[in-house]
Amino acid sequence: MILAAAPPSPLGAHQLLVFLVQLAVLLGAAFALGRLATRVRMPAVVGELAAGVVLGPSLLGPLWPALSRWLFPTDVTQIHLLDAVGQLGVLLLVGFTGMHLDVGLARRRGGAAAWVSAGGLLIPLGLGFAAGFALPAVMIGENADRPVFALFLGVAVCVSAIPVIAKVLLEMNLLHRDIGQLVVTAAAVDDVVGWSLLAVVSGMAGAGFTLGHVALSVGSLLVVGVVALVLGRPVVKGALTFANRSGEPGVAVAVVVLLTLVFAAGTHALELEPILGAFVCGLLLSASGLLDREKLTPLRTFVMVVLAPVFFATAGLRMDLTALRHPAVLGAAALVLVLAVVGKFVGAYLGARLGGLGHWEGLALGAGLNARGVIGVIVAMVGLRLGVLTTETYTIVVLVAVVTSLMAPPTLRYAVRRIAVTDEEREREKAFSG
């Protein structure tokens, strides 16, 4: 006689209550502080992260321990409920990032952008890797050895955040300028390489740094590329053709979400990060030429004002700024921040000069690409989840993402003022405004 397995027990009443209150409090605080950040001309993500910091061990925990324990208990099931919402938000957010990359632009402006991207990636990657060997062993996560930790820190230092960069360029009316186009193109290349490097390093977490594990991760990455080109492109085109035949916007939304989740599950099955699959899906959707972005406006709005703020507030909850009172942690934060800023500036500047660009153009590219924003936060969350980073190193990486995003607008504005506007740029501005 075969007995059917007992159905899983439903979520307890208290767990559901805490989960709903958590979502309401985090979303409310993230919305309020995000709006405040934009009013003082800072990226909204700064305020959304601050919401988590205020409600986490940095402030609420020490000031009101009883409320902190009730609102954010250490029960694993409770934590996973909140993380699940955040994971859905970050997958869709990364998917939208891929959808807004102009692959054709990267091909058209290949020469100078390639030099800038190479310099802006390799030099900070090398400096971050070196810093990983300089930091004390207590800052290495339990699932990583020293080389894997160092590689992960290098990736965290070398990434750029195209969502933040694009927003800054729009607000400064620089997208029509040659320098704005170059910044976006170089950031797009950095994004593609950065997600690929993150996937490779994440694949080695827990297994250690050996040639076999490196080869396996790189091989899995190549499989993703081949499958995306051979199978992914026709599937995406077929799905979008079906969605476009329907007059209902809901069909397009459902198709895009479904594709994003399927691609994310595919890369995760290959022991790579699911966000890589979401990003590849976004690239294929953008390159298909069939994507009706207007139909996706409701989904984008929901992701940007609900799911993403919850994710960033949750990321802020994991930060413990009280750790910075320890000289070793504060010194490590200062070291990583300096290396991140200097490495990206020097790398992008040297790449620009090798690509035939001028002094001020090189400085502008270094300023624009220095913003790590949401991408840096996502990388940090991945490292914490995989056990590569400790709470201290996670806090350091998120701080680098926030500080560099705050530095980008004023330094970019200073450099661009000294770059002459060409007739071609004036014509392009007319075309953009028309």
Image (cartoon, helix red, strand yellow):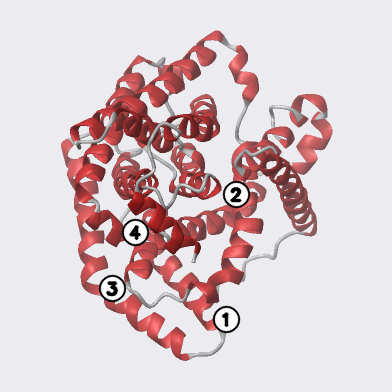
Is residue 294 placed above or below 112 in the rendered structure?
below
**Residue at the spot x=48%, y=46% of the render?**
169
- Mark-to-mark CA distance, 3 and 1: 22 Å
Q: Which residue is mark 2?
A: 311
The amino acid type, in three-letter code, at marker 1 is: Gly
Which sits earlier in the primary sequence, circle 2 or circle 1?
1
- Label at residue 233: 3
Q: Give x and y (percent) for residue 138.
A: 45, 18
Q: Give x and y (percent) for residue 97.
A: 44, 56
Does the CB distance between marks 3 and 4 fall below 8 Å?
no
Residue 328 in view in this figure: yes
Label 1 packing within 10 angstroms: few (<14), some (14-19), many (20+): some
Q: Give x and y (percent) for residue 369.
A: 39, 37
Q: Which residue is mark 4?
A: 267
- Mark-to-mark CA distance, 4 and 2: 21 Å
Q: Secondary structure at mark 1?
A: helix
